[in-house]
Amino acid sequence: MREERILIVDDEEVICNVLDRRLTKEGYLCTTAHNGKEALNLFYQNSYSLILSDIKMPEMSGIELLQKVKAIDPKIKIIMVTAYPEIDLAVNAMRQGAYDFIIKPADLDLIVMSVRKALESKRLEEEIETYHTRLEELVEERTAKLQQAYRYLKKSHLDSVKVLAEAIDAKDPYTRGHSDRVKRMSLAIARHMGFSEERLETLEYGALLHDIGKIGIKDNILQKEGPLSREEYEIIREHPLIGVKIVEGVEFFRDKIPIIRHHHEFYDGSGYPDRLVGEAIPLEARIISLPDAFDAMTSARPHRGVMPLQDAILEMEKCKGKQFDPKVLDIFLREKIYKL
Ligand SMILES: [Fe+2]
């Protein structure tokens, strides 16, 4: 166990010696000073666990010493020993952080007891502090590990969905990268609309998976060169509902269902599958339908080449308020999101 250092301060030499002898006998390492100033100098040069101090002393009083010492080391224990049993002085000392006060002529056993109690309380306070620091470090460490694991999980999750999106795109070789482009443009529009991070994330997954229902459409229809028959067109129109069926059993995809289901609704109500009108169409679906249509126009198709950008923009403008939400279209065109 470490040796506890005690500083004894009293202007009466005899008292200093008596206290010094007794406390040294108790196993403490004692130093004496005869006034506050001397004590303060010693305090600056050494480290003490406890100060046992008189109150009324020449040059610097015990109260002044107490204030100066506590300002530097708030954890140090100070016991006031005073020949002046004015209750005001004692109360003042306690209020300023003294651990205890003892009235002279002091019973030495009482002083030893008070010193032991003070040092035990200091030891406990230090133990609690160490424990708290360790606990904080531990919490910080665990939080960092958890956050890392969460980031890793989220990334692997997104990666799996990206693989799924690529599988959807691969069903139709002419739409390679389509889901990713729709995702990028949709997120850009939504950021201009002030979406929260959480809502952006839902949109991101929804955009990547909006055509997941195409997995259930036969390749010979999806990849058909030349115009589709009415029946084939009807089959293709089933992909939003097939998509819903694919994901509806998975909790994580539940909030992406409206995007998957309604990405082919038209603002004027002439879309599918539910012929929703205007703002009855979920905003996320109204957003996705724009880059979805734009990307289809500007990608090469089996029966036609790539539509020039300006023609595609003109085509989009023609559909304002019909196929597309005018507000979303305005952002798409004004912010030149099609250039992403
Ligand atoms: Fe679609």
Image: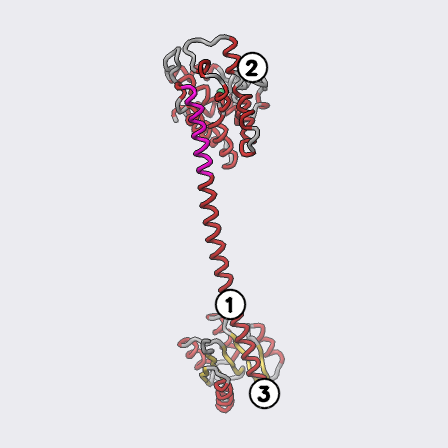
**Looking at the image, which is closer to me, 60 or 265?**
265
- Give the percent coordinates (x, y) of residue 339: 38, 25
Task: Compare marks 2 and 1 and give the one earlier in the sequence.
Answer: 1
- Looking at the rendering, the stretch of residues picked out in magenta corresponds to 154-172
Residue 335 in sight from this viewpoint: no
Residue 2 in sight from this viewpoint: yes
- Give the percent coordinates (x, y) of residue 26: 50, 84
**Residue 270, labelled with which disc?**
2
Q: Nearer the viewer, mark 1 or mark 3?
A: 1
What residue sits 44% from the left and 37% below the top? 156
SS state under label 1: helix
State the residue position of label 1.
127
What residue sits 46% from the left and 25% below the top? 331
**Looking at the image, which is closer to me, 62 or 267?**
267
- Give the percent coordinates (x, y) of residue 244: 55, 25
State the residue position of label 3.
107
- Give left or right: position of 36 versus 255: left
Task: Compare marks 3 and 2 and give the one earlier in the sequence.
Answer: 3
Label 2 environment density (alpha carbons within 10 Å; few <14, some 14–19, many ≥20): some
In this figure, which colouring scheme has been used for the structure? secondary structure
Label 1 environment density (alpha carbons within 10 Å; few <14, some 14–19, many ≥20): few
Task: Compare marks 1 and 3 and give the one earlier in the sequence.
Answer: 3
Q: What amino acid is found at the position of numbered circle 3 in the picture?
A: Asp
- Give the percent coordinates (x, y) of residue 113: 57, 81
Is-magenta flag for residue 166?
A: yes
Q: What amino acid is found at the position of numbered circle 1 in the picture?
A: Glu
